[in-house]
Amino acid sequence: MDNAVAVISKVLPVILLIFLGNILQRTGFLKQSTVEDLKKIIVNIGLPSLLFLAFTGTAFEARYLLIFFAVFLVCVIMLVFGGLYKKAARLDNDYVPALFSGFETGMMGYSLFVAVFGAENMFKIAIMDIGQVTFVFFVLVSYLQRKNGQTSNARQLLLSFIKSPVILAIIIGSLSGTFGVITAIEQLPVFSSVLEAIKLLSNLTSPIICIIIGYELHVSLHALKGPLLAALTRLAILLAIAFALNKILIGGILQLDRSYEIALYTLFLLPPPFVVPIYMKESNGKDRDFILNSISISILLSLAAFLILILIV
């Protein structure tokens, strides 16, 4: 009982901040344009700062590449399954397959994981995330662009991947930790101040992300059945896959500790990437409502599933 209360007390601040974000949206306290600016700060500054610090304390191991390929493959399989689900459910919405693949780690997963396990363990879910980030950049974005009649060549996709602040933060953080750069910097007053500034920026990330999530929650009750069924189907399949991967790969072949298994579960219970509606045409009103409703429902399901997961394991 005491353990359950301790876990809930760690997750509850996240839920309260999401609730606050929803209140700010309903009362009109924040404008949508302000929220978009906050997203830019998080994606380009706050989250990279958090990831940089997380990876300075660990060395990237070659065995993690197996996790990279496994997660990437799961994303591809789920995109294909999404196409099959679209046909089986007779949905006239070309963007439905995108709902089944990829995970919103940046704007949700890291905040949930850090709330319970602390920033010092964030690199564990980041390791799980690299495969799906690669999938989103090279496969999902290309898929969404084709649905809009747009195209991107391999060079453009590669450049956008390399220039991504999140990827740069992981690479620079890993190299800094491996070669002891951070230890040397901490001994120099001026450079240590820069490092402290990065730490302060990273502390902003989780609360702002939670407020943004709450602000953008839009569950339409009059069109609930289709999005709810899609979200539940996706979550059930992904958690089953996570169970198998944890038994075979994480705990079996790689012999990683239990916290890595929880990191994989956390990744796979997350909602679809929030980038999906960004690539939709504004004219696709009905299709867009379905996608936004599905993502909002998935956010609520993810919060509930994460709380249950932590209480169980």
Image (cartoon, rainbow, N blue to C red):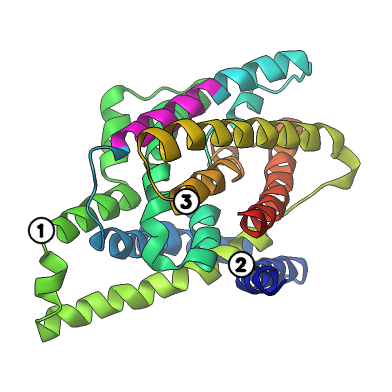
- Point out which mark residue 179 bears: 1
Give above or below for 122 relative to 100. Answer: below
Comparing 227 with 57, the one in front is 57
Identity, as a three-letter code, of the amino acid under mark 1 = Phe
Q: Residues within 10 Å of mark 2 (few under 14, many from 20)?
A: many
Residue positioned 30% across, 73% down in the render: 198
| Residue visible at 28% across and 52% down in the picture | 170
Q: Nearer the viewer, residue 188 or 266?
A: 266
| Numbered range of the magenta stretch | 65-77
Q: CA distance from mark 1 to mark 3?
A: 28 Å
Q: Is residue 33 left or right of residue 299?
A: left
- The secondary structure that most of the magenta stretch takes on is helix
Front of the two marks 1 and 2: 1
Residue 305 on image: x %, y %:
68, 50
Determine crowd level at label 3: few under 14, some 14-19, many 20+ residues with C-alpha closer than 10 A.
few
Looking at the image, residue 158 sits to the left or right of residue 125; the answer is left
Instruction: Write down the residue under mark 2.
Output: 211
CA–CA distance between discs 1 and 2?
37 Å
Q: Quadrant of residue 16?
A: bottom right
Q: Report the disc number at residue 246.
A: none
Tell me the kind of residue under disc 3. Arg
Q: Is residue 281 visible?
A: no
The vertical placement of 21 against 130, above or below, is: below
Residue 298: percent from the left, percent from the top? 69, 45
* Amino acid residing under circle 2: Ile
**Marker disc for residue 258:** 3
* Residue occupying the far right of the picture: 222
Judged from the image, the secondary structure of the residue bearing numbered disc 3 is helix
Location of residue 129 in the rendering, given as x and y in whole percent from the top left corner: 42, 44
Q: Pick whichever of labels 1 and 2 is earlier in the sequence.
A: 1
